[in-house]
Image: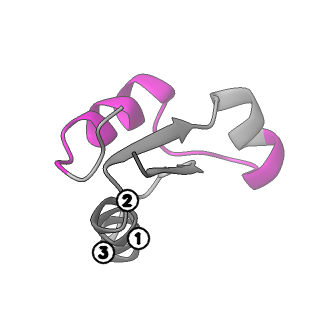
Amino acid sequence: MNISYSFGFVDLFHYGHLNALKVASENADLHVFGLVSDQTAQEWLGNIVSGINERKAVIESIKFVDE
């Protein structure tokens, strides 16, 4: 089984994010996505627009992410 892993903030989700997830999914049997915590996102980016629950809902709704 081929597993791909990606991670991100996806604070302002856009086409580039979607395309990256699609490519990762197409090249694996299982695609796992790690969502960066609010604290880490704020440390790396400064201000964030959406909280982890909102960002998680977006990721969970995308068919290219299995876990």
Quadrant location, the C terminus: top left
Q: Which residues are magenta?
A: 43-63
Q: Nearer the viewer, mark 2 or mark 1?
A: 1
The residue shown at (55%, 37%) is 34
Q: Which residue is mark 3?
A: 15
Residue 35: give x, y in percent of width and height.
54, 36
Front of the two marks 3 and 1:
1
Question: What kind of element bears circle 3?
Answer: helix
- Look at mark 1 in the image and give the residue it sits on: 20
Q: Residues within 10 Å of mark 3 (few under 14, many from 20)?
A: few
Tell whether position 50 is magenta: yes
What distance separates the C-alpha of mark 3 from that of mark 2? 7 Å
Circle 3: residue type: Tyr
Q: How is the image coloured?
A: one colour
Identify the residue position indicated by label 2 in the image. 13
Residue 14 left/right relative to 41: left
For this view, does 45 lie left or right of residue 66?
Answer: right
Helix, strand or loop at label 2? It is: loop
The relative height of residue 6 versus residue 19 in the rendered view (above or below) is above
